[in-house]
Every structure is written in C-alpha cells, then in structure tokens.
Amino acid sequence: MPEIKNIYIPEIRNIYVSPKVDFNIDTGVCVISGESFLEETNKFYEPLVSWVREYIKTGKSITFNIKLTYFNTSSSKWLLRILYILSEYEKQGGQVEVNWFIFRDDIDLTEDIKDFMEDVGIKINIKYYDNE
C-alpha cells in the first residue's frame, strides 16, 4: 500500500472556484468546504478519491464533513463517487460518518442531500446552521 499523507488545499477563487480541502490521515477527518465549480473537475477530485480509497484500506474510522454551499454538476458526480466508496466501506464493516453542514433555509440543498442518500445508500447527517 502506498504511503498516504494529509491533503490540505486552500480555497482558490478566480474565474473558477475550488473548495478548501483538509484530509487528515491521523484523525480520519476529511473536510471539503466552500464552493466547487471548476474547469477541470477530474484533476481536482481524482486525488481526493484516490486518498479515500487508500485510507479505507487502513481499516480506521473515517468522518467526512462536507461544508459546500454551492457545487456544480461535475463536482456533484465526484462527491457521489466518494460517497459510494464510503458506502461500500461501511457495508464491509468500516466505521463511517458523513456530515453535511448547510444553511437552515437551504431547501434545495437539503433535497439534493436526501437524493444523494437515496442514490448511494449511506446516511448523511444534515447539520443546519443559521445564515447570518
């Protein structure tokens, strides 16, 4: 198994926006936050998918926290891939927690998350906070 390391990517805002990423090998806590609409989504998300695949080989628990306020269609496809991997890991006995933090009044995102849960077969804890 290749050695995996923490991933930290700051949020980048220019013509396109990439989210902040903080995947921690020691704690098993993975955070994606901000907004995600990228020109080359695959170049951004493929290393994250690979990291998750390698991490679950350790057999450790994983907590996946999503704090995205906006994501485009191509980003959602990559998020679904990660959620599928986590769902399969959970079915094999792995300890998985998925949390999605959203504004309390974001009805559309609430529905999207419910669709993700249904499509992937994994529980996503919706954590509401107030839009200030």
Image: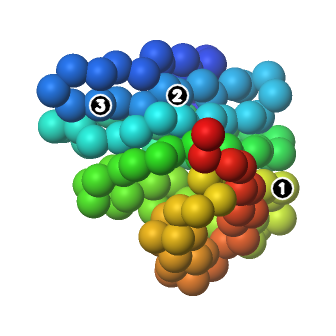
Mark 1 or mark 2: whose residue is earlier in sequence: 2
Quadrant showing the C terminus: top right
Left or right of 108: which side holds 24? right
Question: At label 1, which amino acid type do we have?
Answer: Gln
Q: Secondary structure at mark 1?
A: loop
- From the image, state whether disc 1 or disc 2 is nearer to you: 2
**Where residue 51 sits: x, y (%)?**
54, 35
The residue under the point 50% across, 45% down is 68
Mark 1 or mark 3: whose residue is earlier in sequence: 3
User: 63 or 101, which lies in front?
Assistant: 101
* Mark 1 Cα shell of 10 Å, populated few (<14), some (14-19), many (≥20): some
* Mark 2 Cα shell of 10 Å, populated few (<14), some (14-19), many (≥20): some
Q: CA distance from mark 1 to mark 3?
A: 31 Å
Give the numbered dot on residue 21.
2
Instruction: Write down the residue under mark 1.
Output: 95
**Where residue 63 sits: x, y (%)?**
75, 45
The residue under the point 74% across, 62% down is 125
**Where residue 93 sits: x, y (%)?**
83, 65
